[in-house]
Amino acid sequence: MRTWGGDGREASRSVRLGAVCAGAAVLGLLAACSNTSDAATSSGGGKVIKVVAAENFWGSIATQLGGSHVQVLSVVSDPNADPHDYESSASDARAVAEADYVIENGVGYDAWCDKLLSASPNSSRHVYNVGDTVGKKDGDNPHLWYNPDYVVAAENHIEADLKATDPADADYFTAQRTATDKAFAPMRARLAEIKKVDAGKTVASTESIFVYLANYLGLNLISPPEFMEAVAEGNDPPAASVAAFQQQLSGGTVQTLVYNEQTATAVTSSLKQLATSKNIPVIGVTETIQPADTPFQDWFNSELLDLQNALNPSLTQ
């Protein structure tokens, strides 16, 4: 038996991600904002835009699109925390106050960022709310970065914002976008392959984090919506939805269970154990990039590879 990825990626996720550590140099710009509000300059003499990203998935994209002309601080990146419950700090407030550009997910996911923005009005600071630009509002599914179409929309918007903030370096940002698209190509090829080969296969998820991606790939996501939404909001799922979920896992139709590792509860853990007992492959996903210094596309592609292998357990060379 082999796993997908004819280039030898049969190792565990941790090993695969370790192999991309060289790409972490791209993210070496992640650092705390300076204590001064003076504009920074790059080694080439151009302006360096001070960027605060509420979460590290948007921060990674901004870092790659901005290259040496951005200094990015990603606020939420802790692998052991539920980003929904994040509480901002004084250093976060200072960084937002001094930023040239702030990127927030929106859709109620990072309301703490809105509070910090309101507390430090700045007419020259540009703010990009991803949810607003893709037509999502509070109460909608906030896991926008799991929708590949929304990721492209975010790339387009961030690129345009960087050019508007620093017009003199527009050509540089165009070149960075070209390089970023090239880096994203393997991930997008895998998305296309899964959509072609696995569309229609039945999957379940412990949380709404997987809904956008399942829909994009054409997978048949059958887990009770009220269960996934309750877990995402930190609430106890209705008893009827728990029973229905258990029945789905016991019924022999679910081919893969997607498990959000950052919103694990006693109930979701019991469902994970049930799936394992029924020989249903379980793949873990995370809300923030893990490891934190991994480029967005490598983290996401690793999760896609896990999904692809789970949906095709008997694939042989």
Image (spheres, rainbow, N blue to C red):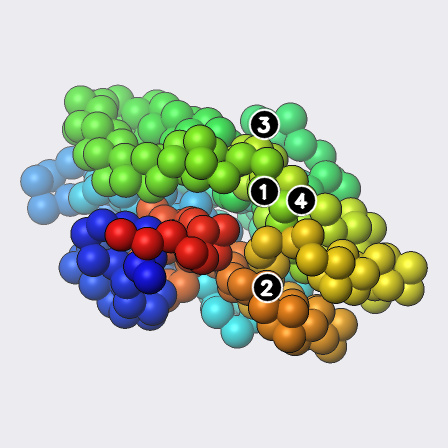
Looking at numbered disc 3 in the image, what kind of residue is underneath it? Val
Q: Secondary structure at mark 4?
A: strand
Q: Residue at x 48, y 69 (%)?
A: 79
Label 2 or label 3, whichever lies nearer to me, is 2
Quadrant of the snapshot with the N terminus: bottom left
Which badge, 1 or 2, is on the more N-terminal residue?
1
Label 1 or label 4, whichever lies nearer to me, is 1
Q: Compared with residue 311, is residue 197 higher up or lower down, i.e. above or below?
A: above
Residue, disc 3:
134
Gap in angstroms between the C-alphas marked 2 and 4: 15 Å
Residue, disc 1:
201
Gap in angstroms between the C-alphas marked 3 and 4: 23 Å
Residue, disc 2:
280
Residue 185, percent across and down?
27, 35
Which badge, 1 or 4, is on the more N-terminal residue?
1
Residue, disc 4:
221
Looking at numbered disc 1 in the image, what kind of residue is underneath it? Lys
Which badge, 3 or 1, is on the more N-terminal residue?
3
In this picture, residue 178 sits left or right of residue 191: left
Label 3 or label 1, whichever lies nearer to me, is 1
Q: Is residue 136 visible?
A: yes
Q: Residue at x 38, y 52 (%)?
A: 315
